[in-house]
Structure formats: C-alpha cells, structure tokens
Image (cartoon, rainbow, N blue to C red):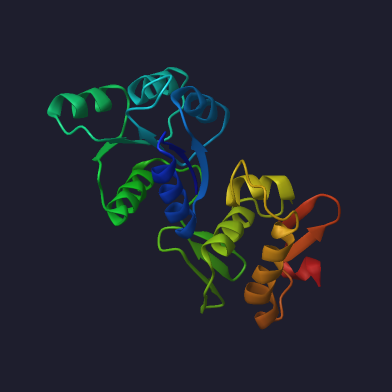
Amino acid sequence: MRVLVAEDQPKMASLLRRGLEADGYAVDCAGDGVDALWYGTEWDYDVIILDVGLPKMGGFEVCRKLRERERWAPVLMLTVRDTVTDRVAGLDSGADDYLTKPFAFDELLARLRALVRRTPAPRPPLLQWEDLVLDPASKTVSRAGTPIELSPKEFSLLHLLMSRAEVVVSRSEILDHVWDFAYDGTSNIVDVYVRYLRNKIDRPFSRHTIETVRGEGYRLIRDSAGG
C-alpha cells in the first residue's frame, strides 16, 4: 500500500511516516499544499492523508483540485478544528473521512483500512500463485497450507510481485511501491529483501518462484519453468 502524507509540522509528519512504515505502508511526504497537489496528481496512491492547515494551498483546496483532476484516491483529512462547519467543508471538498487532532494512531490506521476496503480495487482481494496464497486484508501468506510469517516490507514486496505475476518488475518500481518515492538508503536493499523472501517462500518448500532477470528486475514464475 502506498500513502501520501501531506502535513506541514515536521514532528507530526515524521511520526506518521514511522508509524505507517512500521505497518507496511510505503510513504511519501509533502510539506505544503502545492507539493501535495503535485504528488497526488503525478503518482497513484491507495490513500491520502491531508492536513487542513497546509501552507501555500489549504487542504480543502488541494482535495478539490485533486477531484477536479479525476484523482480518486480516498482522502482522510486531519485538522485541529472540530466544528460541524469544518467537517462539512472537508467532506464537500471531496474528502472521504475526517479525523480531529490529537488522535490515537490506532484509530488513524483503522480509518485508513476502512477507506481502502470500501474503495473499488483493480486486483482481486485474494492473490494466488500455484500453492502460494496471499490475503491482503488479513496480511497473511501461506504455501501449500503452511502459514509463512513475513515482515511488513517482505509482505509488500510479495504482494507487488504476485499482483504482477510473470511480468518483470524493475528494482526502481519495487523501490517506489514498497519503500517510497524519496528513498535514499542502500542501493541493494531490493536484492536483500528478495533474498529474505526466497528464504521464506521458496527454499523451505524446495521451490523456485522468484526469478532474477539480469539487468532488469524480478518476476514470479511457475515452479516447473524455473527448475
């Protein structure tokens, strides 16, 4: 899952990023309304968290412009104001939900899950590749009926590969979807996590599911094709 956080308070933005990444989200951050509109227009997100009081362009206006540009990712508005007028203004601008600061982070996660669930998804809720099964709703994975424990990043990587089975997924695509747009960590992080995945979904079952396509990326293959 990829989320855009538009929040101008650095401490709040940092807390949201860390918490969401720990829950398996890839997170992009925007510090003002102009950047939020650019990110939301140029990139596809599963959900957008939008602070009302953004500098340069307020959250209501950002949400309105995103809808005018036919960007339909669900939007959760954050605000310190808790009047009926403000809530109505947020919903009228095209937002899907409204959360007042301060809030419990668990409530924010629950609201995000609810928004994603009720948004029509282009892919099936349950992904299956041969005897490998991934359930995005419960965040569980099993192979031949045996549960497999994955970290949030491992789960997101496998989800991406299974949703694009037999298609080569480049390292840059994986970084964008599993980590975030501005990731500046080690360049071999994708290869490291592919190795982690292989050690959990392939080797214990004597399978070869994840193929390395030299110079391009990775893809899921049928076990009989990989050897």
Q: Position of residue 85 (x, y in %)?
A: 15, 24
Q: Is residue 170 at least partly visible in the picture?
A: no
Residue 156 picture location, percent across and down: 55, 57
Residue 10 in view here: yes
Using residue 161 as the reference point, say whether residue 112 is left or right of it: left
Q: Is residue 81 left or right of residue 149?
A: left
**Snapshot quadrant of residue 153:** bottom right
Rendered location of residue 138, percent (x, y):
40, 63
In the image, 30 versus 224, the foreground residue is 30
Residue at the farthest right position:
214
Above or below: residue 206 compared with residue 160: below
Along the horizontal axis of the image, is 114 left or right of 134? left
Judge by depth and name the residue closer to the eye, 106 or 208: 106
Residue 78 figure quarter: top left
* Side of 185 relative to 102 (left or right): right
Furthest residue in direction left, as rendered: 84
Q: Residue at x 71, y 69 (%)?
A: 195
Name the quadrant of the C terminus: bottom right
